[in-house]
Amino acid sequence: MEGINTVNVLSIDEEKLKFRITVSFSAPQLAQDSGEYKFLLPIPTAIGNNEDYNSCVIDCNGFTAYALGGTADPTWNVNIGGGVRVKVGALELQMDIPSSQTITTTNVVPADSGVGNSRVGGYREVLFLQVNSVGDGNGNVDSASGRCATWVGTSPAKPIMCGNPFGKTITIRNHDPISDDLCWLVSFGAGAGSADVGHYVYSFDVTMVPNK
């Protein structure tokens, strides 16, 4: 049986609507609130400032979080009552980019039972976490050491329709999906609610959508 030759034909008009955004934060160096980080998203081309493209679809296709190699006991802190160190299996990534197509419903307290506590709108995407070993900066790659740990987040979700984010100051928030409270990496020994020791890296694909 002969193979079938296929050709992937790319259209310049379509490809120029696609943008890749990489954002990183070194929390120990920033004078920003823990778990919440701001940055200015510049306009890369005229399309990002074109009244014919008021909307886009955004997909977070990569996330990682890790502490400096000198932090031997990294763990997540959730901002409940000043801070609680907890096991976190997923993050909900939230950004203040308008969207009418998202809902978050949490069920934490008895009053939520059978009903839930819902918030509607804004960019929201759940990233399911796994812990990998990437070494500690001193040549050690022992996966059993907290110094080597990095949390990697992936999402099977499809891109979501949002407003045009370019030319605006964007706020990224790492939320615990169970409580919907901010969360960030701390040293366990430093105690709950202690300083943010995390480095956070996000990768997004953005595709502009014509108004018509």
Image (tube, grey):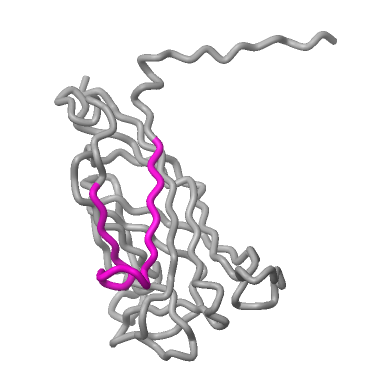
- Outermost residue to the right: 1
The span picked out in magenta is: 20-40
Q: Position of residue 100 (x, y in %)?
A: 23, 45
- The answer to whether residue 38 is magenta is yes
| Residue at 38 percent of width and 29 percent of height | 18
- In the rendered image, the vertical position of residue 156 relative to residue 129, given as above or below: above
Residue 113, image x, y percentages: 34, 75
Q: Quadrant of residue 167?
A: top left
Tell me if residue 79 is in the magenta stretch.
Answer: no
Residue 190 percent across, percent down from the top left = 43, 90
Tell me if residue 198 can be seen.
yes
- 25 relative position to 82: left or right: right
Residue 35 as seen in the image, left or right of residue 137: left
Whether residue 107 is visible, yes or no, is no
Seen from this angle, which residue lies furthest front?
A: 138
x, y (%) of residue 168? 18, 45
Residue in the picture at 39% in, 61% down? 92
Q: Is residue 173 above or below residue 97?
A: below
Q: Is residue 142 left or right of residue 7?
A: right
**On screen, residue 15 above or below 82:** above
User: In front: 29, or 185?
Assistant: 29
The one of 179 and 79 positioned closer to us in this rendering: 79
Residue 6's quadrant in the figure?
Answer: top right
Disc tally is 0
Image quarter where the N terminus lies is top right
Q: Residue at x 56, y 73 (%)?
A: 69
Q: Residue furthest left?
A: 51
Q: Residue at x 44, y 84 (%)?
A: 85
Quadrant placement of the C terminus? top left
